Amino acid sequence: MIPEEIKKLIGTGGAVKYYAVEKGAVRRFAEAVDDTNPLFQDEEYARKSKYGTIIAPPGFFGWPLKQTRGSPLAVDIPPELEAAFEKAGYPLSLVLDGGMEYEFFLPVKAGDVLSAVTTVRNLRERSGEGGSIIVSFLDTVYHNQAGAMVAKQQLMFVRRSLNSPSQEAGHV
Amino acid sequence: MSEQLYWEDIEVGSEITPLAKIATTQMLVRWAGASGDFNPLHYDSAYVASVGLGQVIIHGALKRQWLIQLMTDWIGEQGFLKKFSCQYGAMDYPRHMKSISEPQDGETWYCRGKVTKKYVDGTLHLVDCKISLENGKGEITTSGRATVILPSKSV
């Protein structure tokens, strides 16, 4: 059974967050992957490309405009959901990345400011011997400053209760 | 960058040009900074031991980004990655550093993929692919799917 205080958050979310896509951050991101694609880091090359400017590798949406004191992870978990997990004994230290789905509509360009809205689409429980595992499905929709949708993402993340076997989820 | 790939160049079963990757502890630190994922599981051996794991593990999101690069390298500047998904099946462990810039000998990972479907939707020339990440033992530790739009020679 998924605790009621967590379950009731299905369908919630919706606070808009803004992300600035800075060219230096784009380059750092590509460098971190050892991705040498000039579209992501060579201004001269990018200017002559069909995009006319540096674009971000798919999956990079910039950094929050307003720094919030939040999760030490890159995952943008709605604060109410995070609080509910902590309270019910599913600590952040036992979070696992379960996977990702993206649909891309437009390239993200250096200089863009994206707005993002995240919704808790679903929660599913997988029971293990020593405890419980909850898989959260978080949907995020990104729009650019012109109001055009650039991407939809569905993140799956796994939370384990304190007494669940540590290896059970089997993936990170 | 290599020559532009066209929709006509590929068939169902065509192999995506494989992408070799070497993860090091240094790369994981770079990724932590660039992605904002500061989970100590990925850089702090003492912490890792305290939670019962043997060694620091590679971020799932880094493996995901390798697979995204597999696709963007393959489709070239005129291609567009339309859909992408991946799931993690097993953990991976980075190489340690031999010097300030050189990794120790060890595992090399390969991102691979194959075309599963080729079709036209309106004016779009599309290709579906199955993709995976293989560790040094040849085991698949991450798998996924992608749909790309490719330029066509006929338009």
Image (tube, coloured by chain):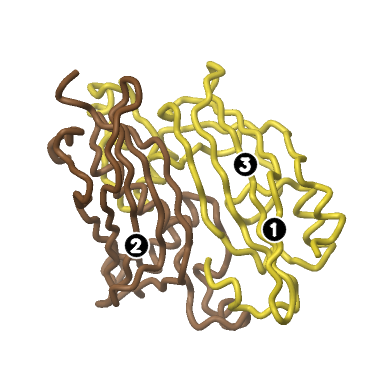
Residue corresponding to mark 3? A139
Q: Chain of mark 1?
A: A
Question: SS of the residue at dot 1?
Answer: strand
Placement of A122 over or under A150, stated as above or below: below
* Amino acid residing under circle 2: Leu
Q: Are marks 1 and 3 on the same chain?
A: yes
Foreground disc of the pair 1, 3: 1
Q: Chain of mark 2?
A: B
State the residue lying farthest toward the right: A4
Q: Position of residue A30 (x, y in %)?
A: 36, 45
Foreground disc of the pair 2, 1: 1
Name the quadrant containing residue A68: top right
Say if mark 1 contacts mark 3, CB within 8 Å. no
Q: Write down which chain is painted yellow.
A: A
Q: CA distance from mark 3 to mark 2?
A: 25 Å
Q: Mark 1 Cα within 10 Å, few/some/many (few <14, many 20+)?
A: some
Say if mark 3 contacts mark 2, CB within 8 Å. no
Q: Write down which chain is painted brown.
A: B
Tag on residue A124? 1
Q: Position of residue A129 (x, y in %)?
A: 71, 81
| Residue located 59% across and 54% down the image | A156
* Amino acid residing under circle 3: Asp
Question: SS of the residue at dot 2?
Answer: strand
Q: Tell me if B20 is positioned left or right of B53 in this view.
A: left
Q: How many marks?
A: 3
Residue corresponding to mark 2? B133
| Residue located 36% across and 68% down the image | B140
Q: Are marks 2 and 1 on the same chain?
A: no
Q: Position of residue B155 (x, y in %)?
A: 19, 18
Q: Mark 3 Cα within 10 Å, few/some/many (few <14, many 20+)?
A: many
Question: SS of the residue at dot 3?
Answer: strand
Q: Mark 2 Cα within 10 Å, few/some/many (few <14, many 20+)?
A: many
